[in-house]
Amino acid sequence: MPADLLARIKVNARVPRHVAVIMDGNGRWARRRGLPRHAGHWEGMKAVREAIEGACAAGVEILTLFAFSTENWKRPRSEIDALMGLLQAYAEKEQERLVRAGVEVRVLGEVDRLDPLSREAVRRIEERTRGGSVLLLNLMVSYGGREELVRAARKLAAKAREGCLDPESIDASTLERALFTAGLPDPDLLVRTSGEFRVSNFMLWQLAYTELYISPALWPDFTREDFYAAILDYQRRERRFGRVSAG
Ligand code: FPP
């Protein structure tokens, strides 16, 4: 069945270059089973693997996963610790598989807010996967879209104050270069799981013309077939970027 879907994706040819994912529903998945929330996050790792392998097979070039938001710092300490432990375990356990698959990992966000062990895990996984040329995997950690824009505004204001930047010369590309995602194309497709129709402070600038796909599956239940279904749905869309239709 996944092979059929993959074959259809390939026939359609227009594969999204950049797919971003809001991985939602881990807590609900756990609650429905009478398990603690962190069990849902751990189970979510399997779906991360599915999405990465699906992206590689389909020919997606960039996969961006929302792993920890700036708002997530407000969760109970025990859950934050579990998520950071998961990040460390992920970096350790998955690195060989990622290198073999040709995946380069980058961690984008306020990495300096992480504890020393998590920062070290981030450094190691980035270093060991550097140069992977099949897929770029962006893990968004301690990331918020508004915070990213505020940070970019501060950077540009500081440059202007130093006399290195003429405020009149600032345009969209100047701002883009000051974002965590500098140099990357915007996502073509955003997938959100657990049936929620919200962007939740994710990539506010970059999602301007992105196609949205909402899956009812809770993240730990999200399979490679679900990932392929999202791409097939995208391939049926007509993207106009504010222009009128060609036909
Ligand atoms: C949202 O579910 C999910 C998160 C806050 C964490 C996402 C992290 C993972 C899936 C683990 C993958 C980690 C790495 C390192 C790649 P929620 O807790 O908000 O669920 P709920 O809305 O049902 O409560």
Image (cartoon, rainbow, N blue to C red):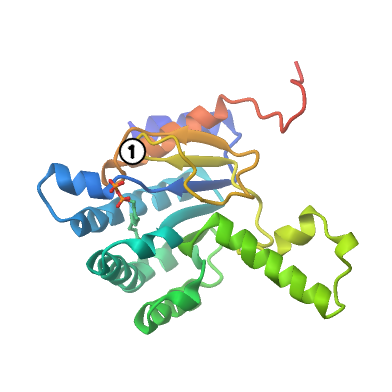
Horizontal and vertical percent position of residue 221: 26, 42
Residue under the image location 43 percent in, 74 percent down: 125
Q: Is residue 170 above or below residue 237?
A: below
Q: Residue at x 43, y 47 (%)?
A: 22
- 159 horizontally vs 98: left or right: right
The image quarter in which residue 71 lies: bottom left
| Foreground of the two, 20 or 78 | 78
Name the quadrant where ligand 1 sits. bottom left
Which residue is more in the foreground, 69 or 9?
A: 69
Q: Report the quarter where the N terminus lies.
A: top left
The residue identified by callout 1 is 194
| Residue situated in front as seen by the camera: 216 or 151 | 151
Mark 1: which secondary structure? Answer: loop
Quadrant where the C terminus sits is top right
Name the residue: 37% across, 80% down: 115
Image location (x, y in percent) of residue 30: 18, 49
Residue 69 in sight from this viewpoint: no
Is 21 on the left-hand or right-hand side of 155?
A: left
The residue carrying pointer 1 sits among few (fewer than 14), some (14 to 19) or many (20 or more) residues within 10 Å by Cα, namely many
Does the Cβ of the disc 1 residue fall within 8 Å of ligand 1? yes
Of all residues, the one furthest to the top in this rendering is 247
Q: Quadrant of residue 3?
A: top left
Q: Amino acid at mark 1?
A: Ser
The percent coordinates of residue 230 (x first, y second) are: 45, 34
In this figure, what is the number of numbered marks?
1
| Residue 60 higher or lower than 143, as above or below | above
Image coords of residue 200 (percent x, y): 47, 47
Quadrant housing residue 234: top right
User: Is residue 118 visible in this depiction of the protein?
Assistant: yes
